[in-house]
């Protein structure tokens, strides 16, 4: 397991992926706040808001963890929550939820009606999922309907999270674990290398918890 050393405990706030996750959470809350007050939509509204929050919170928790491997794992949790939110957007676009007779158009407001943002068509009918999937998430178009904006934010975050995870994976492969694996192998010599790392942690006055955290040893 590669140790993750950071001199800035709030460094995650400088990450583009964190700022985009904040924007996603705000956009989701703004969108779901306009849901019709129907009993059948309460659970959907709550789940979408929870998913959006989870995307951001897991980025934060991953940053705070003591190892690159754990950071990588929590980014995976963020990706899962983001995928769940995007799937909810897809279901709404497909018309799988009753919106009290308002439909997607009622949720979007009038600014999209007849404006012609889709190649000058001025089509007042709801966009299909295939049309939305073809829209680029960059550069971001703030004139798209809120639901479509939310969907594209999910796509953008999936792209950014994947890039960050890939970067961390490469770091782990080229780090201590990669060195041990290639230089010492997985037999007795590999075990000796792992024992050496354990001794280094012990000599530093630290101990490893079951969850992977390194903490100062308790004085006896």
Image (cartoon, rainbow, N blue to C red):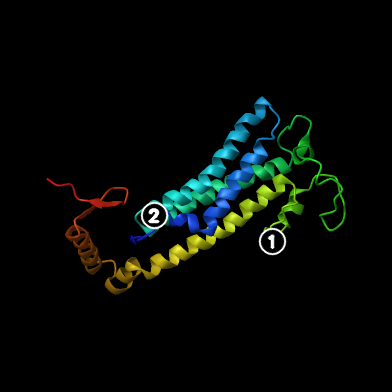
Q: In the visual, does 200 lie left or right of 176?
A: left
Measured as percent of width and height from the top left, residue 218 is found at 18, 47
Q: In front here: 26 or 190?
A: 26
Q: In the visual, does 214 lie left or right of 168?
A: left
Residue 68 in which image quadrant: bottom left
Dot 2 lies on which element? loop
| Tally of numbered discs | 2
**Nearest to viewer (mark 1 / mark 2):** 2
The residue wearing badge 1 is: 139
Measured as percent of width and height from the top left, residue 177 is found at 33, 66
Q: Quadrant of the N terminus?
A: bottom left
Dot 1 lies on which element? loop
Furthest-top residue in view? 39
Kindly indicate whether the residue at mark 2 contacts the one at mark 1 (C-beta within 8 angstroms): no
Residue 41 drawn above or below residue 150:
above
Furthest-left residue in view? 220
What residue do we see at 44% from left, 67% from top? 170
């Amino acid at each position: 397991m590669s140790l993750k050393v950071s001199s800035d405990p709030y460094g995650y706030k400088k990450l583009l992926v964190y700022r985009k996750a904040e924007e996603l959470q705000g956009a989701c809350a703004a969108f779901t706040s306009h849901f019709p007050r129907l009993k059948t939509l309460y659970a959907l509204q709550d789940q979408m808001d929870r998913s959006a929050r989870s995307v951001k919170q897991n980025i934060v928790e991953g940053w705070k963890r003591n190892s690159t491997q754990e950071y990588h794992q929590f980014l995976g949790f963020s990706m899962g929550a983001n995928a769940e939110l995007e799937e909810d957007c897809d279901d709404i676009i497909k018309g799988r939820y009753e919106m009290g007779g308002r439909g997607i158009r009622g949720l979007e407001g009038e600014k999209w009606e007849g404006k012609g943002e889709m190649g000058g068509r001025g089509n007042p009918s709801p966009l299909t999922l295939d049309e939305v999937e073809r829209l680029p998430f960059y550069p971001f178009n703030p004139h798209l309907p809120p639901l479509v904006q939310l969907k594209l934010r999910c796509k953008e975050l999936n792209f950014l999270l994947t890039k960050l995870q890939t970067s961390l994976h490469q770091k782990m492969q080229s780090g201590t674990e990669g060195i041990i694996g290639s230089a010492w192998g997985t037999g007795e010599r590999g075990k000796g290398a792992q024992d050496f790392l354990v001794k280094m942690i012990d000599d530093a006055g630290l101990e490893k918890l079951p969850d992977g955290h390194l903490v100062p040893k308790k004085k006896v």
